[in-house]
Image (tube, rainbow, N blue to C red):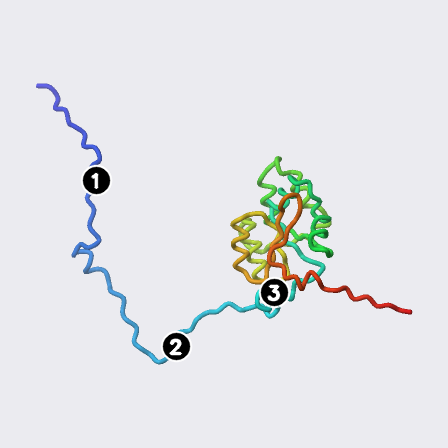
């Protein structure tokens, strides 16, 4: 007698207990209904900045503080734009580009291809901001900093980051478009502030 050949059973599924099985229903505890009380439920509401007047932010005034993202620097290099001069041409005022430790860490991770962007980020004219949080994800860092302090403009070309910042009221966005910088959500009343001069005769 030869060996018996066993045929394999393809696509055989393991038998699993149904979620509606009576044996499981005994163990599941039903949530208890809350007793009706006269006290209203407390809701947690975010604190609104005192500088906000509807959508416009009174904290944003020259000299502008602009938080710069990694791809904003890359797009500026691709379009051959000088960051410092182009910002002043766009906003018609003095600008201080700021860069966080997370953005520099992100540029260092990108390697040799982005060494020019890293060298520009380490320029002494850029204001360096230290980060105290864990991790080096630049988008979260920028969003957290902007929600805490509403005195910054954000320079970015990242669609996801733009969408996140648009949800925060009173934070303008600077972006690169067609060989120049553009501004989004900056009230016209801020850009047209007259400079007071004292004439002594």
Give the residue drawn at x 69%, y 60%: 191
For the N terminus, the image quarter is: top left
Residue 175, position as x, y percentages in the image: 61, 49
Q: Label 2 crowding class (10 Å Cα cut-off): few <14, some 14-19, many 20+? A: few
Q: Label 1 crowding class (10 Å Cα cut-off): few <14, some 14-19, many 20+? A: few
| Residue pointed to by mark 3 | 56
Q: Nearer the viewer, residue 163 or 28?
A: 163
User: In which quadrant of the rendered view does residue 192 lie?
Assistant: bottom right
In the rendered view, does 64 fall on the left or right side of 143? right
In the rendered view, does 89 fall on the left or right side of 37? right
| Residue pointed to by mark 1 | 13
Give the spatial CA distance, label 1 vs label 3: 61 Å
Give the spatial CA distance, label 2 vs label 3: 33 Å
Is any part of residue 189 visible from this angle?
yes
**Which of disc 3 and disc 1 is earlier in sequence?**
1
Give the residue drawn at x 33%, y 79%: 37
Residue 40 circle label: 2
Q: Secondary structure at mark 3?
A: strand
User: In which quadrant of the rendered view does residue 198 lie?
Assistant: bottom right
């Amino acid at each position: 007698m030869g060996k018996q050949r066993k045929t394999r059973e393809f696509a055989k599924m393991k038998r699993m207990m149904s979620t509606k099985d009576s044996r499981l229903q005994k163990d599941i505890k039903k949530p208890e209904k809350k007793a009706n009380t006269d006290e209203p439920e407390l809701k947690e509401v975010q604190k609104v900045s005192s500088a906000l007047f509807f959508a416009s932010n009174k904290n944003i005034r020259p000299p502008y503080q602009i938080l710069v993202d990694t791809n904003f620097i890359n797009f500026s290099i691709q379009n051959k734009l000088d960051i410092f001069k182009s910002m002043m041409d766009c906003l018609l005022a003095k600008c201080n580009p700021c860069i966080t430790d997370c953005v520099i860490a992100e540029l260092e991770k990108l390697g040799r291809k982005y060494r020019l962007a890293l060298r520009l980020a380490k320029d002494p004219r850029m204001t360096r901001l230290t980060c105290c949080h864990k991790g080096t994800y630049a988008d979260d860092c920028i969003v957290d900093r902007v929600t805490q302090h509403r005195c910054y403009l954000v320079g970015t070309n990242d669609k996801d980051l733009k969408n996140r910042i648009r949800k925060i009221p009173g934070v303008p966005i600077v972006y690169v478009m067609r060989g120049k910088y553009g501004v989004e959500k900056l009230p016209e009343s801020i850009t047209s502030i007259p400079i007071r001069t004292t004439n002594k005769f």
